[in-house]
Image (cartoon, coloured by chain):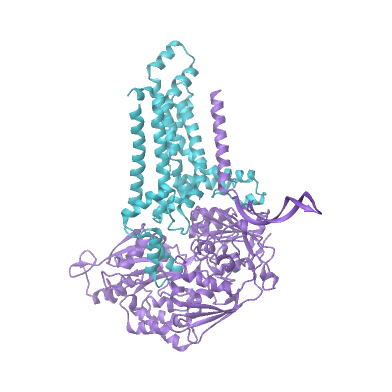
Amino acid sequence: MQRYLVRRILQFFLIVFIANSLTFIVPRLVPGDPITEFLNNQQLLNPNPEFETWVADYKAKFGTDRPLWEQYLNFWAGAVRGDFGYSIISFPQTVMHRIGVALPWTIGLVSVGTLLAFLFGTSMGALLGWPDSPQMFQWFVPVLMVIGGIPFWLFSFVVIWIFAVELGILPPAGGINMLDVLIQGDTLQARVVSIAQHAALPIFVFVLFGVGGWGLTMRANLIMTLGEDYILFAHAKGLPESRIFLRYGVRNALLPVLTALAMAIGGIIGGSTLLETAFSYPGVGSVVGAAIQQRDYFVISGAAFFMILSSALALLLVDLMYPLIDPRVRYQ
Amino acid sequence: MRAKVLYGLLATCFVLVLVGVSACSQPAPEVIREVITQVVKETQIVEIEGETVIQEVEVERVVEVTVTPEPMTGAMQSIPRDRTLVLGAWEHAAQLNGTDNFNPIINTASVRTNYAKWVFEALMYNNMNTGEEYPWLAESYELDDDYMGMTIYLRKGVTWSDGEDFTCTDVKFTIEAHRDTETAARRGEFSRWFESVECLDDFTVRIDYTGTNPRIHQRLMIGWENHFVIVPEHIFRDKDVATFTNLDLGKGWPIGTGPYKLILVSPQQVIYDRRDTWWGAETGFMDMPEPLRIVGTNAASDEAYAQMYMTDRLDYGGFALMLGSFEAARDRNPTVRSWFDEGPAYGAPDGCVYQLQLNNNRFDTNVRLALNYALDRQEIVDLAYQGSTYVKVAPISDYVTGAWGSIVNPVIDSFNRDNPSQAKVEEYMTAAGYAMNADGFWEKDGEVLEFTVTVPVPWAVMGPVIAEQFTRAGIKADEQLDTAGQWPNMVVNGDYDGVAYVHCGSNFDPFDSLSFFHSDCYAPEGADVPTGCGGMKGHRFVGDPDMDLAIEMMEGAVGDPNNPEFVKWVETALEVYMREMPTLVIAEELHIIAMNDSYWTGWPTADDPYVAPYPCWSDFTLVPYRITATR
């Protein structure tokens, strides 16, 4: 058991190390230099006769004038201190500020969306997999598959069009409208209402697309579980159907889905770039999307660091929990 | 029972997350400790008339106190929507950029896109449509006869929002901070040209240049996308300008001379409220602007901005809309309009033109002319821009031709370059030594003429049309969409055939635009262009002695359409340009800036062009003084 723990913890550090090293190196392999590019764009507004000196000053400021291996060491030294330097495209904003202001929005949106999608999806999947469920539930399978096939962003536009433009009952973009909040006297209640209104449509889309995945996984798990001998035995004992369904079926089928939920929670920090962009939602996904587009190395590395860390932590927790949940792992 | 517990837990999670986000979206007020001198009561043993007594006395003591500054939102009043001006930022972003820094010396976004232009004011504003100047913090300025310096006369009676007087010291400090701060956006030009800044008295600024320059004053006195606003010396003087964020609402920062104060800042909105007192109204210089509150907000896409217009959530601005989005917004909300009321060319010029920038090392004059006649500019306008702009053949925007039209247009028209013609293509390709091969492509010494049209993402729509037109004319062309933003480096090192983007040169006289074609920026194949010749100056045009001379003469003089000598130099340089066609200009760059008459009216339009319509330009500062509420 001890070896198992040590191996998993070492694996965690290895994952964090390798994944962060890749996200550090890969953007830098793309030819060209984003700092020169950024200053070239600045040149349109403020021509600089001493352009090369300007570029050199900025590179020194960002540390990109150093050899790659030195930059790499500096990255790890900064990561330990929680300092990822400045954003290139939003200079003089720091990476931590960019991520820090975006993080609460993403956590709010994606965690609520993930939990709701999990709740509805697994409930629906369980009902779909249970042979005694009403026939109408079978219609949901193709519906879920069709919804899952529609591009996220396209569906977002449709939802915005219906609820924000045609019906005008929900805002089309943003995370909060302080203008409305101030009109109402800047109370906590007004803020919560505004946040909830802005989050409603993206969460709706998130849940709609998440439900399919959770539902179909749960359905498959339940169908497999129903083939187990203990289910047959429960029937033979004459136990009530509801008891067999909930205690023997759903409970056992839920185990692998819970693992996936833990992984999904670990991935929350990454946000959802397309969803956040479609709704102009001020989360980490939007920040990362903009950073990738404009090759803002430092923001990419900083955001990726936290995404990797949270995913790896979730993976580690699942690994550590497994022996408790499933005794077979302990015996192995 | 368990299900109930589960649902209860989930509902609690939902509420907690929402409350958490709400709390996190607004930082809690910081508690700080300050050392102050305070009168305190102390119990002392004293002798009165020989008797020892214990009594309480008041003494001055240096004490440490805990101070809780005003929360970030400050004291906020409820101001109705119809007295609030809501402006979109000039960018597509889910978060406003740079909202943690209101130091305009190092963070130009604070004034450009985050609207601190109503906190900090400029020396002068001007109308880019007419060239008219609006003196503001400065009443006037004089250039030396030899253009070796200038003198600025400041307005008296101007005060900062904390009550301090605005004086020459503030202007001197601001110019020097731009010049001497390593990461200041304007450091390059300022350090190149501004040798010394002196205060002759409280309201007279004397600037000496390092050399002759009849245009450098424009960087101080005229603002377009480039804002030059004055910061308070008494706040900045003991700070490190390179790191000072100038943001502390509890202390009233940022302090400015403008009629608005910042009251709330978040990545979603920046909010400014009108101050009760403003020097302009107090001195009778200008009435208070009508909007009681100005909100700067943002959206991540063209569609999102259009949706905000449809639902009256935006009064003006945002990034320029695409034609389809604008028309969709106007269909849903008839109070939405743009610079021109009739389309499809609704937008206003912005000083730039669309161009296919050529690598002149690879194409001699004959081939360039053949490429020119292979281009069907009107087709590019129709297909790529859905008819929302109009054709141009010279690198001089309508902002310049407004004043210079009668001088430059006859020269441009005399060459008749906007005339797509396969016969002309054949004539010039043959003159260049090419012959059409069996596959229908031009070939010389066994090599087919190939052309890669590199297109950065913002101008992606032009690429396929240009490539198709070249191929139709027998030039084997393909389009390369530059998603990685490589083009600035390609232009510097010469690894390109043509880049389709913009040429932004002159705003005032044709000098800047034509100066890009001086031989100083030439570099042979394989070598980088000289320092300062990247981007739009990286044509690698070998130059022409007449053009070089004309550009040099223009550089040393003020661009004046009434100066016959200057006009002659403009004509000479333009004739060489039109003869050589070192770049292929395609169309005017027009931006469809949406404006919504639902709550406010009186926007700058083609019918009332009191300023250029771009919210990211300095002159937009004048708009709140002109608009009136509709309700």
Residue A48, compared with residue B328, is above or below; it is: below
Q: Position of residue A66 (x, y in %)?
A: 34, 58
Check the picture and name the quadrant holding the N terminus of chain B.
Answer: top right
Q: Along the horizontal axis of the image, is A21 left or right of B206?
A: left
**Direction right: furthest residue:** B49
Give the image location of residue B560, x and y in percent. Answer: 49, 84
Q: Which residue reaches farthest front?
A: B50
Q: Is residue A7 visible?
A: yes
Residue at x 61% of width, y 54% of height: B34
Camera-nearest residue between B126 and B70: B70
In the picture, the quarter occupied by the C terminus of chain B is bottom right
Rendering coords of residue A311 (x, y %)? 41, 39
- Asked whether B99 or B342 is in front, the reply is B99
In the figure, what tint was chain B given?
purple
Please say if A311 is above or below A244: below
Q: Quadrant of residue A4?
A: top left
Which residue appears at 61% of the width and 57% of the height? B249
Residue B348 x, y percent position in the rendering: 51, 68
The letter of the cyan chain is A
Observer-nearest of A171 and B164:
B164
Above or below, comparing residue B487 to residue A173 in the picture: below
- In the displayed structure, B196 sits above or below B161; it is below
